[in-house]
Amino acid sequence: MVLYVIGIGPGNKGEMTEQAWSALSDCQVIAGYELYVELIREWFPEKEYIRTSMKKEIQRCEAAIQQAREGKKVAMISSGDAGIYGMAGILHELAAPYPDIEIKVIPGITAACSGAAVLGAPLTHDFAVISLSDLLTPWEVIEKRIHGAAMADFVICFYNPSSIKRSGYLKKACEIIMKHQPETLMTGTVRNIGREGESSEIMPLSRLVETQVDMFTTVFIGNSRTKAINGKLVTPRGYL
């Protein structure tokens, strides 16, 4: 028995890998967070779907595992890459008692990659990806990671930078970074990556700290060498 865990990329059909498309076409049941299910339902209207809301990840996985144990071909989907803040880890954990189920992870384009492509080339040197969501990670731990990345002059990519309950988290993160980096540091934001309404903006850290974003936005903080070139955000690798 094979249970696929598939990264569907940003949500645009053209940015889904051929391997992911093939697996979704082959399976009978597709499980996922309701928003991600709606992104692909029009392409696979004949499939059986397992949809759950946010914070129902365990129930979603248990339902997918049960369907696989009944002999159905099942795919669990995540936006971006299933192994980066996605469902691959928890599915491996919950399926551990069933060694006859093979978990097969199919990678997808994560927001760090697709968002960087929109902005230009901000990730061409060492970078760190940090989620600002404290649903599963204490804010104190997140703070330490931001301090460490900023102190080490990493380019930083923030996932989940804001929500209704966390409207001030990006501001707090920027204030931490400004303890180690100048406010002139170049940054960028990308919203609705690969989907309708995609938008992006490049700005200094001093302006980003006062910028309100939402959960559909990915934020990029440059390092000390990052600069704007013809309207694009670029981090030199050092070739020149």
Image (cartoon, rainbow, N blue to C red):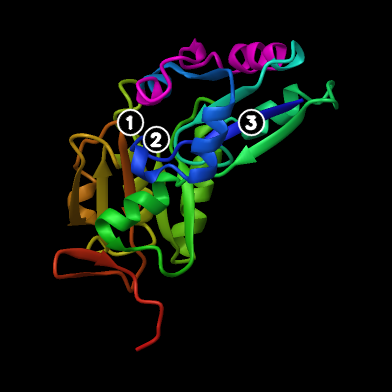
Rendered location of residue 89, percent (x, y): 66, 34
Q: Vertically, is 39 above or below 180?
A: above
Q: Residue at 68% x, 16% y: name it.
A: 72
Query: Three-letter amino acid code at disc 2?
Result: Asn
The foreground one among 142 and 115 is: 115
Residue 86 in view, yes or no: no
Provide the secondary structure element on which disc 2 rests: loop
Provide the secondary structure element on which disc 3 rests: strand
- Circles 3 and 2: CB distance less than 8 Å? no
Query: Three-letter amino acid code at disc 1?
Result: Met
User: Which residue carries the number 2 mark?
Assistant: 160
Quadrant in the picture for the N terminus:
top right
Residue 188 in view, yes or no: yes
Q: Give the numbered dot on residue 4.
A: 3
The foreground one among 236 and 75 is: 75
Q: Residues within 10 Å of mark 1 (few under 14, many from 20)?
A: some
Alpha-carbon span between mark 2 and mark 1: 5 Å
Q: Closer to the N terminus: mark 2 or mark 1?
A: 2
Q: Residues within 10 Å of mark 3 (few under 14, many from 20)?
A: many
Q: Which residues are magenta?
A: 39-67
Q: Is residue 27 left or right of residue 65?
A: left
Rendered location of residue 82, percent (x, y): 55, 37
Q: Is residue 81 left or right of residue 180?
A: right
Which of discs 1 and 3 lies nearer the camera? The answer is 3
